[in-house]
Image (tube, rainbow, N blue to C red):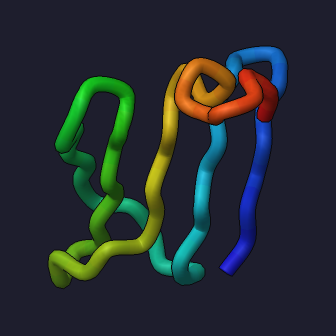
Amino acid sequence: MRVRVDAQSDAIYLDLTLGAIDSSEEVAEGIILDYDVQGDLVGIEILDASKRSQDGTT
């Protein structure tokens, strides 16, 4: 698993596998799940990350 932080766009991405993304689904405002061709979860994107943390930082 790898965590990528993009401070400029205020986003966090969790790479759960090395699989290629085939489709994505926004399951809540600013929370996007990425799936491979078999439908397995490969990543999670969190937008407006600093607004979601308790201390307001990413």
The quarter of the picture where the N terminus appears is bottom right
Q: How many marks?
A: 0
Q: Residue at x 18, y 43 (%)?
A: 27
Give how far across and how far down residue 47 sits, in percent. Answer: 51, 28
Q: Residue at x 17, y 76 (%)?
A: 39
As rendered, which of 52 and 11 lies closer to the eye?
Answer: 52
Q: Residue at x 73, y 61 (%)?
A: 3
Vertical comparison of 16 with 21: above or below: below
Vertical comparison of 57 with 4: above or below: above
Give how far across and how far down residue 44 sits, in percent. Answer: 45, 56
The quarter of the picture where the C terminus appears is top right
Vertical comparison of 3 with 6: above or below: below
Horizontal side, residue 49 vs residue 39: left or right: right
Q: Residue at x 39, y 61 (%)?
A: 21
Give how far across and how far down residue 45 sits, in percent. Answer: 49, 45
The image quadrant that residue 16 belongs to is bottom right
The image quadrant that residue 15 belongs to is bottom right
Horizontal side, residue 58 vs residue 31: left or right: right
Give how far across and how far down residue 56 sits, in percent. Answer: 73, 22
